Image (cartoon, rainbow, N blue to C red):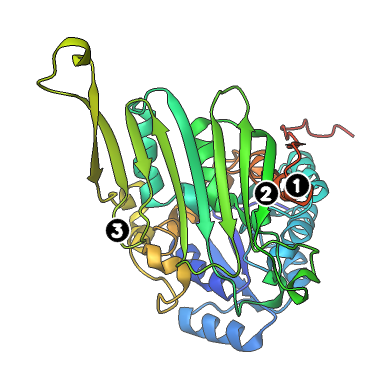
């Protein structure tokens, strides 16, 4: 299959996925977007509303079309691994919502196929493209944090009433929103984990996955650093409003996501303490300042720049839109990176190796929780050479 300079992209899954359709439609480097969903009402409603005429009911039909260059999966969480494998095996580029997979073997196969086929894979991790993360990253890259001491991530979300595959899901299987910002900033991977579950699910909720915990907390050791990180995740039975958050503390600067989503993040800055003498002359004080993160529409083509601030398709009532413009304005940044990686014939920023190293820690962490906090090694993923056969 010959890839066009401007790819044709198929968007599969039009529940939450419908939010991405107008962004692909309006991206200057996309030839056109096609839609796929088994729900005929959703397929026709979204297609009619957005003026997108090419529509399919099955992923298999999409993969059979030689003119489609790339597929973006916004489908059920347990299906991500198998569907991503199918997309890459069909010779198409693949983007997938998080997590990459819930099986280490599927993660390894996606890594292998990306190298073997030469097609791009990208995990569409919103947390590393929010305006808050981009602002924190600019401060971090400028060296203002100094030596980092500690970092933590959390994701609180009640999945009551969501589709049945969420029922009893191990919380740490779906923790990439909490861990990805920290691994990106620290430019490292998790090497081992100790984790504990908390609370107890009803017996009915334990049926599908054999998971007894509504909440889990993990402590990760990291590669080539003395820093360890803490990740906490809840899925059921916790009276807490939705948030995806991280905090990172250095010797000179700290960043903390707000407790309430409508508030600006908190920045902690160390300053010399004035007026102190004697043995206190080198003492410092920490000032806490709330700083609104700037919108980074300037990083995007003008045709999709406005989508950092707007609910694109829905009425904005979905939980992710509490953060404004869909997961902190991240959606158009994700689309742009995926499309440009195809056009520029380079790996995406969250390629298969990165995605696996961000997803595997959650699988290892849940295993540790099931073993009462036993230390578990996290599998290491590296880019593999393409087959010469």
Q: Outermost residue, top direction?
A: 278
Q: Outermost residue, right direction?
A: 389
- Picture coordinates of residue 180 (x, y %)? 55, 44
The residue drawn where x is 42% and y is 77% is 317
State yes or no: discs 1 and 3 in contact (Cβ < 8 Å): no
Earlier residue among tags 1 and 3: 3
Label 3 Cα crowd, 10 Å radius (few <14 / some 14-19 / many 20+): few
Whether residue 87 is visible here, answered yes or no, is: yes
Say the numbered circle drawn on residue 196. Answer: 2
Label 2 Cα crowd, 10 Å radius (few <14 / some 14-19 / many 20+): many
The residue drawn where x is 56% and y is 46% is 231
Left or right for 138, reference 374: left
State yes or no: discs 2 and 1 in contact (Cβ < 8 Å): yes
**In this orientation, which residue lies closer to the viewer: 2 or 359?**
359
Say the numbered circle drawn on residue 16. Answer: none
Tell me where residue 277 sits by quadrant. top left
Q: Is residue 292 above or below residue 241?
A: above
- Picture coordinates of residue 13 (x, y %)? 63, 72
Where disc 1 sits, the SS reads loop
Q: CA distance from mark 1 to mark 3?
A: 36 Å
**In this orientation, which residue lies closer to the viewer: 67 or 219?**
219
Q: Which residue is mark 3?
A: 263
Q: Nearer the viewer, mark 1 or mark 3?
A: 1
Quadrant where the C terminus is found in the figure: top right
Q: Is residue 209 above or below residue 138?
A: below
Q: Which residue is mark 1?
A: 372
């Amino acid at each position: 299959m010959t890839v066009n300079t401007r790819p044709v992209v198929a968007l599969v899954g039009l529940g939450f996925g419908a939010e991405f359709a107008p962004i692909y439609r309006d991206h200057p480097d996309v030839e056109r977007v096609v839609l796929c969903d088994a729900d005929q009402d959703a397929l026709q409603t979204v297609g009619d509303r957005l003026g997108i005429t090419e529509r399919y009911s099955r992923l298999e039909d999409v993969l059979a079309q030689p003119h489609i260059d790339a597929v973006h999966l916004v489908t059920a969480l347990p299906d991500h691994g198998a569907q991503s494998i199918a997309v890459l095996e069909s010779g198409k580029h693949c983007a997938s919502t998080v997590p990459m997979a819930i099986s280490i073997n599927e993660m390894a196969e996606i890594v292998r196929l990306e190298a073997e086929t030469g097609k791009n894979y990208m995990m569409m991790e919103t947390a590393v493209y929010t305006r808050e993360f981009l602002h924190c990253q600019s401060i971090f890259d400028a060296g203002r944090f100094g030596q980092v001491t500690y970092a933590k991530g959390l994701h609180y979300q009640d999945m009551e009433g969501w589709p049945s595959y969420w029922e009893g899901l191990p919380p740490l299987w779906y923790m990439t929103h909490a861990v990805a910002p920290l691994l990106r900033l620290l430019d490292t991977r998790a090497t081992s984990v100790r984790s504990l579950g908390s609370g107890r699910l009803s017996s009915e909720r334990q049926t599908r996955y054999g998971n007894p915990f509504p909440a889990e907390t993990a402590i990760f050791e990291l590669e080539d650093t003395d820093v360890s990180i803490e990740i906490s995740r809840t899925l059921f039975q916790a009276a807490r409003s939705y948030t995806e958050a991280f905090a990172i503390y250095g010797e000179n600067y700290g960043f903390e996501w707000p407790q309430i989503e409508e508030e600006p993040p908190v920045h902690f800055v160390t300053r010399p303490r004035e007026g102190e003498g004697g043995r206190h002359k080198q003492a410092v004080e920490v000032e806490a300042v709330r700083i609104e993160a700037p919108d980074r529409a300037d990083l995007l083509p003008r045709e999709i720049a406005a989508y950092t601030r707007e609910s694109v398709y829905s009425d904005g009532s979905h939980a992710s839109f509490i953060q404004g413009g869909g997961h902190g304005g991240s959606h158009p940044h994700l689309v742009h990176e995926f499309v440009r990686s195809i056009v520029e014939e380079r790996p995406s920023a969250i390629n298969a190796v990165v995605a696996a190293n961000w997803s595997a820690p959650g699988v290892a962490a849940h295993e540790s929780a099931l073993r009462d906090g036993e230390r578990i090694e996290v599998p290491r993923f590296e880019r593999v050479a393409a087959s010469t056969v």
